[in-house]
Image (cartoon, grey):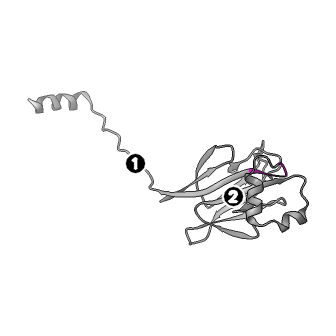
Amino acid sequence: MAKVARLHDNLNRTQYFMLGREEIIGRPTETAMPGAPRPASIAVDNKHVSRHHARIAAAPGAGAYYIEDLSGRGTYVNFRKVVGRFPLKEGDRICVLQFRNIHPTELERMTDRDLKECVDDARNDSVKAIVDMTFEYAEMEAPKPVEAPRPQGFLEKLKGMFRRS
């Protein structure tokens, strides 16, 4: 069975994609250069998102997924900063945040709840969610191949007409 991820962002857009072994969240690139890492499969067109910001990958043999931050700016799951490989569960909220007018030490003192309230408050300009997605997946069976009807020639059509009578 194939796994399909549903990523719903803060602009009320939903993207669906087949989960492969690895998906990259990042800024789209114009051209792929030979020898360069592959482009982002989950494209986010924002200058605060790195070209390769985060990676969602399958855990070997477990049938589960994890996320890994690849940027210098940070990726958050349920408002906890991702350090190393972070296991994903259905319903996890993945965020890439932009910070304005906030000192890093002040940010470190914030609880997960405080950070969530800052992001969710539309009046607050100090912390904004550039990417705000919910990770979900559904198991889907691969479609069964449809058999093409056998071509019938003129002789076959005549035989069919005589069999009915």
Say if 26 sits above or below 68 in the image.
Answer: above
Tell me the element at label 2.
strand
- Between discs 1 and 2, the one toward the N terminus: 2
Point out residue 3 in the picture as x, y percentages from the top left corner: 53, 58
Q: Amino acid at mark 2?
A: Ile
* Circle 1 or circle 2, nearest the eye: 2
Q: Report whether residue 49 is seen.
A: yes
Point out residue 34 in the picture as x, y percentages from the top left corner: 78, 50
User: Front-most of 6 and 108?
Assistant: 108
User: Front-most of 103 and 114?
Assistant: 114
150 sits to left or right of 163: right
Which of the 4 image quadrants contains residue 93? Answer: bottom right
Say if 90 sits above or below 43 in the image.
Answer: below
Q: Badge 2: few (under 14), some or many (20 or more) residues near its Cα, within 10 Å?
A: many
CB-based contact (under 8 Å), mark 1 and mark 2: no
99 sits to left or right of 55: right
For residue 63: magenta?
no
Point out residue 135 in the picture as x, y percentages from the top left corner: 61, 57
Residue drawn at x 77%, y 48% as measured from the top left = 27
Residue drawn at x 66%, y 53% as measured from the top left = 133
- Residue that numbered label 1 is attached to: 145
For residue 129: magenta?
yes
Magenta stretch bounds:
125-130
Q: Badge 1: few (under 14), some or many (20 or more) residues near its Cα, within 10 Å?
A: few
Which of the 4 image quadrants contains residue 113? Answer: bottom right
Q: CA distance from mark 1 to mark 2?
A: 36 Å
Question: For the C terminus, which image quadrant?
Answer: top left
Residue found at the far left of this picture: 165
- Residue that numbered label 2 is attached to: 94
Q: Report whether residue 39 is seen.
A: no
